[in-house]
Image (spheres, rainbow, N blue to C red):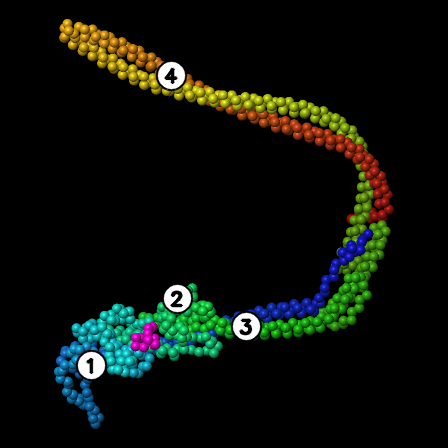
Amino acid sequence: MKTKDAKTLSKPKKAKKTSLSTRLSLSLGTLGFLVILGLSYAIVDLGSQSTKKNLDKNMDDLLSLTGENTNEILGQVTTLSGSMKESISFVWGQDDKIGGVPGNPWTINLKKDGNVNKQHVTQMSGTTFRSRIVDRAVPASRYNMEVVMMDSMYATIQSNPNITGVGYFYEPGKVIEGVTDYAPYMSFKSVQTRDILNYSYDYYKDKAYYTDAKNSLKTTITSAYNPEEDPTKTCVTICDPIVADNDFKGVVTIELDLASFNVLKHEDARFPSLFTSVMDNEGNFLYASNEALKGKNLADASNKEDFGRITEKMKEGKAFHTVAVNSSGAKRRLYFAPTQFGNTTWWSLMSIADAEYQRVTKKLILTSVIIGLSGVLLLIASTYFFVKKTLAPLKMMAIAGDKLSSGDFNIESRYTKNDEIGDLAKSLKNVTIRVKGIIGDLGEKLGAVSKGNFRVDLSDETNYPGDYRPILISLREITKDLSRTMTEIKHSAEEVNAGAEQVSNGAQELSQGSTEQASSIQELGATMNDISVKIKGTAEQSMDANRLSIEAGDAVEESNKKMEEMSEAMREITEKSNEISKIIKTIDDIAFQTNILSLNAAIEAARAGEAGKGFAVVADEVGNLAQKSAKAAQNTSNLIEETINAVSKGAKISSETVESMELVKSKAKDISEIIGKISKASEEESEGLQQLTIGVDQISSVVQTNSATAEESAAASEELSGQANIMHELVSKFQVIEHEE
């Protein structure tokens, strides 16, 4: 019986329903949103890239214009220096002397009445000219050269307000032989006072601008500096080498006020932070529209990391742009382009705040996002109303489907349009009719089967067309299977009844055999207990033998130690005997010498006559004593030699004894190991027998259990036989199919 809680749990919670129109609208809207989002992203990305590209192109154009203007300014200077060099070129081909007649390369012609006639001109007679730069006489050509130089310098400064100074710096003796210091210079201020400065050669000979022009024979330009005459100005000096007949004569120097670069300043309403500057190759600002950067280095306007990266790019000598953080922490976008002048490289620089650069693209992105979102909302709304109107008939189809699923086949469809939904309504009606027919037919046939009639007629296939046919086939198979099953149950009941009797008889015989086995197993258990006790005794005796073997090995080892000590004592006896032999040898030598002395003394006593008779007696006694000493020493030596031989034999015997003891020790160890293994094996056998005894006890218990189970099986078999008879009677009531394919 189900409780109230069980009923509650068995019913799943109904999920919140969402209409198809809503889901389709959301799906289509989401798809449209993704499409529009993708398109918007692509448009924004392309637009952003295009905008950035255009901005970069605009900056590159301004930068190119800056470079062109810079080159134009510097080109004007080099044009002036070229004119100044050309104005004095005439002098290098003249080799006139002081006081000589000035050369006249010109022929004067008079044109009159259409005729051209040579006009007579009287040349200047010989005279002496003096230089106005150095106080000495000069040839006429050099005098004329000075006139030309001063006129050129004057005209250059007067006609160009951005030029602050002009000069001719010469090598020693190139203009006037023997003159070392010849370098006239005219500044803007000196023009007003008509003062000319002459520099010494030592002043400029080692200056970089002069040596670079001299060595390269190319126009050079200095770094920015503040002139002494007017420190408020910032200038650079352009040096143009003077060369004639492959001979370096000197340079023309022109000082240019960097204020002339103010024409490089560019303005753009979109970028209020835009500024233009010109740098040398070391990063020094030669010109900057930003007053704060004048006279500074790029390192002062950027952090260390960015400065290092920018200088590495500048070494490549190509235009580039990058983003860097200035000294105040603001991110700026920088555009660089090189400008080659002579052997010097300058850099044009355009800089804007990165935030202003990004503002243009951000505006485009915002506009695109607003347009995209508006399009998405419009698409979702229009899609929702269209889909809802189009799918309204499907709601009626859904109601009909719910009725059909709940078993209500009274369905009416009022949708008659000839479209896909109309076809769906017709199909639903046909399905309803078909299902009602199948249900009625199945109800009739299953009713007969439920009453035990498995022979119901299932040959009519009219109500089961197409995919409905498996229902009829399954019903046929069910009836056949049930018939077959009932027949088998009947046969099985008969066999169970017969088998139950056999089981009952077998169980009784098993019970009797189990009782006999239990008795035999108990006797076996008692015998195994006796064996276990004897094995334990054997193990204990093996352990005692092992202990005695170990003690014997220790005794042998101790005997080995004593034998080694005895061998050492014999070695020491041998050494002492050798020392005694040496002493005996010494005694023998002394006895020999004493005997010689005794003979000499006897000879001398004989020579002395009567006076020496007493001395001869003493000499004889000494000789006898020496012979006795020699003999005793010889006997002692023989005894010592025999002792050494005996000790050697004893040492040899001792060594052999030690080896025998080692062998005994080794064998005793092997015996000990064998006895240990026997002891261990005995212990393991004892434990195995104990386990075996336990197993026998368990077998005995099992046999007793089997005996009891056999008796119970006999009783159960009798009960099973009775139930089989009842089952046979019940199955006989069913009408089964007699003949099967």
User: For the stretch drawn in magenta, what is the main secondary structure?
Assistant: loop
Disc on the earlier residue, 2 or 3 = 2
Q: Above or below — where is 209 with respect to 578?
A: below
Give the residue drawn at x 25%, y 77%.
185
Question: Can you tell which mark lies on residue 144?
Answer: 1
Report whether residue 279 is seen. no
What residue type is disc 1 on? Asn
Residue wearing tag 4: 647
Label 4, label 2: how far apart the Cα atoms are: 101 Å
* Closer-to-camera residue (272/449): 272
Q: Is residue 230 magenta?
A: yes
Q: Position of residue 624 (x, y in %)?
A: 24, 8
Residue wearing tag 2: 311
Q: Quadrant of residue 142?
A: bottom left
Q: Above or below — where is 208 with respect to 165?
A: above
Label 1 crowd bin: few (<14), some (14–19), many (20+), radius 10 Å: some
Label 2 crowd bin: few (<14), some (14–19), many (20+), radius 10 Å: some
Report whether residue 270 is seen. yes
Give the residue drawn at x 78%, y 32%.
708
Q: Is residue 446 left or right of residue 391?
A: right
Q: Above or below — where is 535 with respect to 399?
A: above
Q: Quadrant of residue 348?
A: bottom left
Question: Can you tell which mark lies on residue 126?
Answer: none
* Closer-to-camera residue (731/739): 731
Label 3 crowd bin: few (<14), some (14–19), many (20+), radius 10 Å: some
Residue wearing tag 3: 365
Label 4 crowd bin: few (<14), some (14–19), many (20+), radius 10 Å: some
What residue type is disc 4 on? Val
Q: Which residues are magenta?
A: 224-235
